[in-house]
Protein backbone atom coordinates (compact mmCIF):
# COMPACT_ATOMS: atom_id res chain seq x y z
CA UNK A 1 0.00 0.00 0.00
CA UNK A 2 1.39 3.42 -0.98
CA UNK A 3 1.78 6.27 1.47
CA UNK A 4 -1.03 8.81 1.50
CA UNK A 5 -0.24 11.89 -0.62
CA UNK A 6 -1.48 15.35 0.27
CA UNK A 7 -1.48 18.44 -1.91
CA UNK A 8 0.40 21.45 -0.58
CA UNK A 9 0.76 24.81 -2.34
CA UNK A 10 4.41 25.89 -2.43
CA UNK A 11 5.78 29.36 -3.05
CA UNK A 12 9.27 29.05 -4.49
CA UNK A 13 11.62 31.51 -6.13
CA UNK A 14 11.98 31.34 -9.89
CA UNK A 15 15.71 30.68 -9.53
CA UNK A 16 15.20 27.70 -7.22
CA UNK A 17 12.39 26.33 -9.39
CA UNK A 18 14.55 26.55 -12.52
CA UNK A 19 17.40 24.73 -10.75
CA UNK A 20 14.96 22.04 -9.54
CA UNK A 21 13.63 21.69 -13.10
CA UNK A 22 17.13 21.12 -14.48
CA UNK A 23 17.93 18.64 -11.69
CA UNK A 24 14.66 16.75 -12.14
CA UNK A 25 15.28 16.57 -15.89
CA UNK A 26 18.73 15.08 -15.22
CA UNK A 27 17.21 12.51 -12.82
CA UNK A 28 14.25 11.72 -15.13
CA UNK A 29 11.73 12.78 -12.46
CA UNK A 30 8.94 15.31 -12.42
CA UNK A 31 9.71 18.52 -10.52
CA UNK A 32 7.18 17.48 -7.88
CA UNK A 33 8.83 14.08 -7.41
CA UNK A 34 12.28 15.70 -7.26
CA UNK A 35 11.19 18.20 -4.58
CA UNK A 36 9.66 15.37 -2.54
CA UNK A 37 12.83 13.27 -2.97
CA UNK A 38 15.11 16.13 -1.86
CA UNK A 39 12.90 16.91 1.15
CA UNK A 40 12.68 13.24 2.16
CA UNK A 41 16.47 12.79 1.91
CA UNK A 42 17.12 15.95 3.95
CA UNK A 43 14.66 14.78 6.62
CA UNK A 44 16.20 11.32 6.70
CA UNK A 45 19.76 12.68 6.99
CA UNK A 46 18.64 15.00 9.81
CA UNK A 47 17.14 12.02 11.65
CA UNK A 48 13.63 13.43 11.38
CA UNK A 49 12.24 10.75 9.07
CA UNK A 50 12.74 7.05 9.42
CA UNK A 51 11.46 4.59 6.83
CA UNK A 52 8.20 2.97 7.88
CA UNK A 53 6.07 0.29 6.35
CA UNK A 54 4.58 2.77 3.83
CA UNK A 55 7.65 4.95 3.30
CA UNK A 56 11.08 3.90 2.04
CA UNK A 57 14.26 5.92 1.76
CA UNK A 58 14.36 5.25 -1.97
CA UNK A 59 10.66 5.68 -2.72
CA UNK A 60 10.96 7.30 -6.14
CA UNK A 61 8.27 5.44 -8.06
CA UNK A 62 7.62 8.60 -10.11
CA UNK A 63 11.02 8.17 -11.73
Image (tube, rainbow, N blue to C red):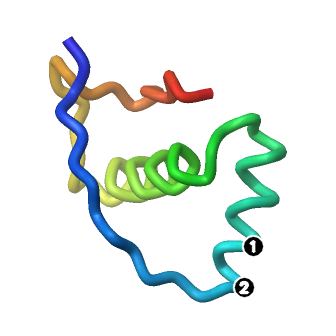
- Horizontally, is 5 left or right of 31 in the view? left
**Local secondary structure at mark 1:** helix
- Mark 2 Cα shell of 10 Å, populated few (<14), some (14-19), many (≥20): few
Quadrant containing the C terminus in the rendered view? top right
Query: Label 1: which residue?
Result: 18
Mark count: 2
The quarter holding residue 27 reads top right
Q: Which mark is residue 59?
A: none
Q: Is residue 54 above or below residue 50?
A: above
Image point (76%, 55%), residue name? 23
Q: Position of residue 54 (x, y in %)?
A: 20, 22
Image point (75%, 35%), residue name? 28
Quadrant containing the N terminus in the rendered view? top left
Query: Label 2: which residue?
Result: 15
- The answer to the question of whether label 1 and label 2 lie on touching residues, with beta carbons closer than 8 A, is yes
Q: Position of residue 51 (x, y in %)?
A: 25, 30
Image point (33%, 70%), residue name? 9
- Mark 1 Cα shell of 10 Å, populated few (<14), some (14-19), many (≥20): few
Image point (22%, 48%), residue name? 6
Q: Position of residue 47 (x, y in %)?
A: 26, 53
Question: Label 1 to label 2, Cα distance in Å?
Answer: 5 Å
Q: Position of residue 22 (x, y in %)?
A: 81, 59
Q: Is residue 5 above or below residue 58?
A: below
Q: Is residue 19 above or below residue 31?
A: below
Q: Is residue 14 above or below residue 55?
A: below
**Local secondary structure at mark 2:** helix
Amino acid sequence: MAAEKKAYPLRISATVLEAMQRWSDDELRSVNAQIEYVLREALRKAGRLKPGKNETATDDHNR
